[in-house]
Image: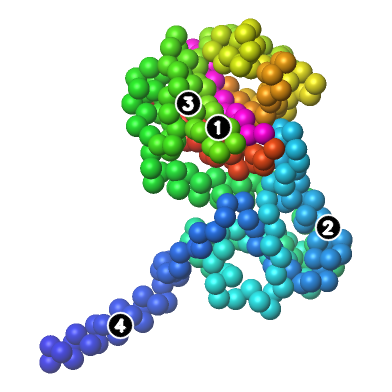
Amino acid sequence: MKNILAIVLMVFTLFYGCNDENAKRIVPKSSGGSLNDITVVVDNLLWENNVGEVIRDTLAAPVEGLSIEEPQFRLRQMPPSVFTGFATKNRTVLKIEKGKPAGTLFIENKYAKPQTVIVISGITNTEIIDQISNNSAKIVDAFKKEELKEKQRRIKKSLFNDKDIQAQMGLSLRFPTAYRIAKNEDGFIWLRRDIETGTVDMMLYETPSSSIRKGDSAVVDIVRLRDSVGKIHIEGPLEGSFMATENKYTPFISETILDNKPAYETKGLWDVKNAFMSGPFINYAIEDKVNNRMVIVEGYVFAPSVAKRDYMFELEAIIKSIAIK
């Protein structure tokens, strides 16, 4: 009798459990793969005409602030007929569905986890193109956030002990043990990672809140600050030389939120006069109202004659892990 009751109870649990709309789906782990690779599931004819063109213009647009053009994402196109099995486990997927009502869906963990799938639909090519164009910023942002999370997850596997940074600056930063503290003096911290062709660097310091004015003057103040710090702390190979902002191009600046605090994001180029050294930088000026200061965290790369997008992406992922105490 007890065995019969146990079987009935098991069947009852399985039946109602399977019909529970809130039951969690078990999805496989997404494939590792290279960062910033997007699988584009679209018919070959669409890929080769104006639909494919607008996809490439949106997702393979050049990264801001680099001296040589590099696409934000690498695109791997495949027709829907082969989007099965292992292919569905890719971390970022853009799916184009022609012949369905116009719409744009953002779906998390549809085929695997973690995963971002964006489905664009439309009856005609024009409707599909309109959906992509009207939602281009959201599409790029969704894919970038997924890849930043993945990069930060990989960084966590081997974290540098940042206790000295916490003690001195009242903030924590998650970065790999491949970096070292090259300088720690007068409220300035310089982090470096050696690479085959040069270095990947970060610098951290603080300044009074009044040092950076609001509005159009912000970029002027940020450039002035980074140049003054570069002159003191980042010397060039020649006597009297130092790192400064490249003045031929105006840096890109935008307002953002970092660690739930208002911040300026500035991207541009740096150089060392008369030393033939230059490269890209990304600078965040974070308003720490509690401590009446601006926290400046900047990353820059010196890697002549090689692609720099992935290095800059690593720096952005590190900086966006900041937690101000």
Instruction: Give the amino acid at mark 3.
Output: Leu
Q: Position of residue 226 (x, y in %)?
A: 62, 16
Q: Looking at the image, is mark 2 or mark 3 earlier in the sequence?
A: 2
Give neighbour class at mark 3: few <14, some 14-19, many 20+ (Cα, 10 Å).
some
Q: Which residue is mark 1?
A: 200
In front of the other: label 3 or label 4?
3
**In the rendering, which numbered label is found on residue 12?**
4
Name the quadrant containing residue 210: top right
Rendered location of residue 30, percent (x, y): 50, 63
Give the main secondary structure, helix, strand or loop, of the magenta stretch.
strand
Query: Badge 3 is on which residue?
Result: 191
Q: Quadrant of residue 131?
A: bottom right
The amino acid type of the residue labelled 2 equals Glu
The kind of residue tagged 1 is Val
On-image quarter of the C terminus: top left
Q: Secondary structure at mark 4?
A: helix
Q: CA distance from mark 3 to mark 4?
A: 60 Å
Query: Could you tell me which residue is drawn at 56 percent across and 38 percent down?
Result: 196
Q: Earlier in the sequence, mark 1 or mark 4?
A: 4
User: Going by the image, does 53 lie left or right of 241?
Assistant: right
Q: Which residues are magenta?
A: 292-304
